[in-house]
Image (cartoon, rainbow, N blue to C red):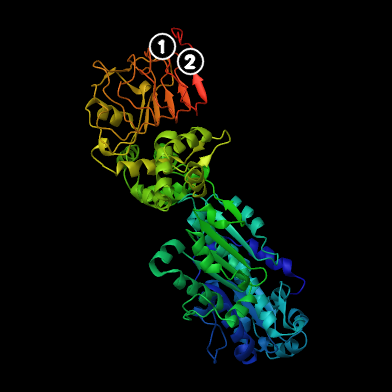
Amino acid sequence: MVDQKVIGVVAASSYSPSVVSSKRYDVFLSFRGEDTRKKFTSHLYDALKQKKVETFIDNRLEKGEEISTTLIQVIEDSHISIVIFSENYASSKWCLGELSKIMECKKEKGQIVIPVFYDIDPSHVRKQTGSYEKLFVTHKGEPMCNKWKAALTEAANLAAWDSQTYRVESELLKDIVEDVLQKLAPIYPNCHKGLVGIEENYEKIESLLKVGSNEVKILGIWGMGGIGKTTLARALYDKLSHEFEGHCFLENVREESDKHGVKALRNKLFSELLGNKNHCFDVAFSVTKFVLSRLGRKKVFIVLDDVATSEQLENLIEDFDFMGLGSRVVVTSRNKQIFSQDKIYEVKELSFHHSLQLFSLTVFREKQPKYGYEDLSRSATYYCKGVPLALKVLGATLRSRSKGAWECELRKLQKFPNMKIHSVLKLSYDGLDHTQKDIFLDIACFFRGNQRDHVTNMLEAFDFSAISGIEALLDRALITVSGCNQLEMHDLIQEMGWEIVHQECVKDPGRRSRLWKHEEVHEVFKYNKGTDIVEGIILDLSKLIEDLYLSSDFLAKMTNVRFFKIHSWSKFNIFNVYLPNGLNTLSHKMRYLHWDGFCLESLPANFCAEKLVELCMRCSKLKKLWDGVQNLVNLKTIDLWGSRDLIEIPDLSLAEKLENVSLCYCESLRE
């Protein structure tokens, strides 16, 4: 390219994207037909067409003296004009008229102009010397002559391409197309509404990709469902793919693989990379050496979107060596395990500022909430907790609706999740095995915010494979670990877990596996609605608005309860649970029994503590736990803190796993 390149860059960067967003053509070609139509111009047009650049070429062989009104409109309706200066370009009043209009659009509308000097000295164009001087003799007396000369001089002083500096024409064509793609890229900055707030993601991912290096790299984009992985990958693809010789974006790999098989996806991948759209490779995935050798000479950019398993990834790019130097593969997934040793970028939630902006764009088509809807918009945004999918779905639900409808919908969300959001998030849950699902639901309903080690011990007590199960949930972005080693999860993911349990029996909470909502636990206890389906229960005493009196058999039907917790954050409870007629039975499958303020002097005589791992009964009225010797082979913790009436503790000689005993403030203890 000639020395004035910086001028073209300035012109491109000053161009307003909002002005060009509705233009019809990407490129307008201006050329002298007799000089270049059958050679260079036709090749350039085909090269641009292959890159999906919308290009206008005037194929009329006979042209008049002045350009038509239609052609003037086409020039104005183009982002870029490529002017191909050839030996006889200045002989055509039509071409000179086109050039004048192009330079006018550059000045008034910021149009990008790319001059190409094809087999001609650039100074002949710039100064109208050589053949151009002779050609202008024929235009002597034309009123537009000075304007044409000024346009030639101005255009020739722009950053330009000179064919005489190239050994082969194909290299010139390649560089011009690359230049066009680079100049077009920033013209479409807002083609994805989901790009709100992810500029920082761009910078970090591009630094990880190191597009300029000759290494072949794979980058994983990982995060929870709906967090914007696909949107980010699509934006990267749109921005970077033009820098590669071949590219392919495979969407919904998980879903398409289930529907059509990995073979069909692999066929599509190789077909697009080779430019053979309808080619079908052989059945057994083994591609011919010829095909692999062709691909091995191409620098390619591949996006594999929503890959669920390592098998899918391996089947799609098992011949890793087929990609040429400098190739890049971007893989989006909810499953961190598939990435092996590859670099991984975790997509985080949007900030509240950017969340509100995305929500407002979805609802109001503006970056700020509509007047009068500010507080409602903030409430809706807060509910979504930075998840782009939730912001878009909820925004679409509320669009064009009254304030009353907004208020009703937001109240509804406090009880029931939005099912479109729920169904997307649930895909991560559906990919778990049975034990992992149990672990996830236990954390969602009972253990969120608890120490990881403690939860691991509890889950192991339930005969779950806790260590590997928790790691699987971490890999799928269903849970996180805080700096204090606590297990946490996004509010919407916890809500998804709650809804899964709720759907076990919508109308009868006593027929669900887990009970944690205060009102539902209160109802099941008070009216004896429990069943053998219930596995876990938690009740917060601080939420009682009056004393709760229960029958002696309120737990009798719940024979499969393994986790039971009645607790309080304070040792001074205003209200408590009372058992006027005693307690007949507890589940023999109980692993965890936590009952603060227990009101009886002992546990049921028929209670079998063999499976019990943790017993916590703080501030209880217990005088003793039970009579005789229990086989406490699994017991690790006894906490009877503040049980001031406690007289004796049981024989613990068989409790070989016992690690912790707390008897603080058990002031009546004698033995």
| SS under mark 1 | loop
Q: Where is residue 174 in the image (x, y as percent from the top left)?
A: 66, 78
Circle on res. 588: none
Residue 379 visible at all? no
* Tags 2 and 1 touching, CB below 8 Å: yes
Residue 194 visible at all? yes
Answer with left or right where residue 414 lies relative to residue 276.
left
Q: Is residue 98 above or below residue 640?
A: below
| SS under mark 2 | loop
Q: Which of marks 2 and 1 is nearer the N terminus?
A: 1
Q: Quadrant of residue 595?
A: top left
Q: How crowded is mark 1: few (under 14 residues within 10 Å), some or many (20 or more)?
A: many
Q: In which quarter of the image is residue 508?
A: top left
Dividing the image into 4 quarters, which one contains the C terminus? top left
Answer with left or right where residue 544 lies relative to residue 616.
left
Which residue bears the numbered disc 2? 663
The kind of residue tagged 1 is: Leu
Q: Position of residue 471 (x, y in %)?
A: 52, 46
User: Could you tell me which residue is drawn at 64 percent across and 61 percent down?
Assistant: 13
User: Could you tell me which residue is drawn at 53 percent across and 34 percent down?
Assistant: 453
Dividing the image into 4 quarters, which one contains the N terminus? bottom right
Q: Where is residue 384 in the image (x, y as percent from the top left)?
A: 43, 43
Answer with left or right where residue 376 lies relative to residue 662.
left
Q: Is residue 75 above or below residue 348?
A: below
Which residue bears the numbered disc 1? 646
Q: In which quarter of the image is residue 49?
A: bottom right
The kind of residue tagged 2 is: Leu
Q: Is residue 225 above or below residue 176?
A: above
